[in-house]
Image (cartoon, helix red, strand yellow):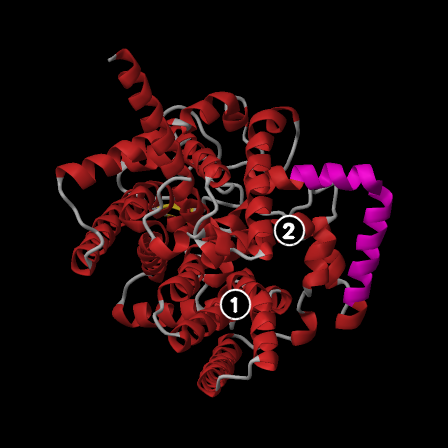
Amino acid sequence: MSEIENGSEMQIGCDSLLERAVHMTFKVAAIGIVFLIVAVAPSVAYLCRKEWLVDGSWLLAAASLTVPLALGLFTTAVLRRFDVDLRDDRVFRRFVLGFVAVLLACQAFVLIGARFSTGWDVWWLTLPRAYTHGDYLSESSVYFGGYPNQLFLYALFSAVDMACGALGVSSYPVLAAGGCLCVTIALAACLCVARELWGPRGALMFAPVAFVYLGLNGWIMVPYSDSIGMFFTSAVLCCYVCARTPVRRAVGMTAFTVVGYMVKPTIVFPALTVVLLMVPRAVRALREWRTVGSDKAKVLGVAKTAAASVLVAVALWCGCSAVKAWSFDADPDRAFSMTHFLMMGANDAAGGGFSLDDVEYSYSFDNPGERSRANIERWLRRIQDLGPSGVASLGLRKALTNFADGTFAWECEGDFYLQQRGRIGAVQDWYGTGEVGARPGSGLEYEVVCQVCWIATLIGCAAAPRCGGGRRAAMQLALLMLMVFLLVFEARARYVFLFAPYFVLLAVPGWMRIWDGVCILVNRRLEGRC
């Protein structure tokens, strides 16, 4: 095992059977995704397939092996040459603040250089209230009626728009800047998690990939729940790993989960995994209390923590619900339930992704109960028509759609470029903004870098030793839940972006292990020559 600089977590034998099973399942999943990208994707047609990435998958996979070597050289140089002691809290705070400052400056440069306005769902969320409650009232009623999960984010965007209107400035760049800020804070929180789990060397390995791959990812220019949601997934994880008291941990996780759920429902996965992983420990504790007797102080502490979490959850849920009600008076009977997305996930003709035909089918039912029953019936009929082999084939294509693209399906949403607002040609050429697709000098280099980083991240996840205990297992189980969700329901690679820091964090010990192995091999060769 690589030397992970975190004393208590090196005792890997303390992992429960469930945590070991989660670790092995996640490693198998990471290996399987790499295999799909390299060996299967070139010969399979799937949704959002990018020929320029698929055709060179073997070469990109080979190039990705240089990432842990480059990170190893970087961390070794920083730790030795500059004598940086990130174990010191004051030094680490300066490091994080420097990371944040430089990243925000780079993101501002990106927004100035290549920002654009986009269509699809973002168009509805950034539409001023004067239009949604005026000229587009009927269309808005249909959209927000079907997708009430967008109402909270629309309320926040509307408040920003009204404030910007009072100041006489456009709200769209402000919203995009807010998304960038959310991503930056999320990565700063994950830096703290990396140091807590993997030590200073792990934090240094996490920083460059997080900066380049996630902090300057093209999706930061799109003001939507994916970039904003990354803040909540990272905040929940940071509370779980770094909070020093059980009350702070529980209340923090509860608060960020409740508000995050209003932004993106999948944000509940991290908190749900923590609860599941606590079940075996809770069972053991109950058995001990029955045999030995309960510790009144511990019982009182658990009761206080639970009460505080419930109070915070109820208060935030009521507050967020009030905000949603203010944003738009949507008809609750028009809302699509999970059965709608389950039905779309089994649409073989649409590759398990978005289907306008399915949307119109769900809209054709006015009664929520009838709509859900019709969705289930169509889903069952599709599963029966596909048969076992058809379901397996669709699952394979959905897995490729969700996880084979390191850009998270950049440019694959409808009406992606409505209006170009960038001012720097070089930045526009790097991201390829303005034209869908990629070619040399217009987006290809950016997408290749993303794909190399993504494959390197998956390789790191596959190579990681079993360290980090329950905190590592919580991240892994959250990602496994996300994988199952995307395989069963609507396939969409963009949904992976807000969980991308988890993948990079889990890859860090694998990169450390690879670097340590290379160093040992080189030292042996040198000793042999001597």
Q: Is most of the magenta stretch helix, strand or loop?
A: helix
- Is 496 left, or right, of 235 in this rendering? right
Q: Type of residue at label 1? A: Tyr
Residue 165 image offset from top left, x and y in percent: 32, 69
Give the crowd class for mark 1: few <14, some 14-19, many >=20 residues within 10 Å: many
Q: Quarter of the image containing the N terminus? A: top left
> Residue at position x 31%, y 35% from top?
71
Q: Nearer the viewer, residue 453 or 227?
A: 453
Q: Position of residue 9 (x, y in %)?
A: 40, 54
Viewer can see residue 235: yes
Q: Say which quarter of the image contains residue 277.
A: bottom right
Q: Nearer the viewer, residue 91 or 161?
A: 91
Image x and y of residue 457, in percent: 44, 39
The quarter of the rendered structure image containing the C terminus is: top left
| Residue visible at 79% across and 54% down in the picture | 379
Callout 2 secondary element: helix
- Residue at (55%, 41%) from the top-left corner? 27
Q: Nearer the viewer, residue 388 or 47?
A: 388
Q: Residue furthest front?
A: 292
Whether residue 18 appears in magenta in the rendering, the answer is: no
Identify which residue is drawn at 56% across, 51% down: 20
Mark 2 vs mark 1: which is more N-terminal? 1
Residue 101 vertical position relative to residue 462 in the rendered view, above or below: below
Label 2, on which residue? 484
- State the extent of the magenta-drawn residues as a range: 371-397
Is residue 140 in sight in this rendering? no
| Residue that carries the numbered disc 1 in the rendered image | 261
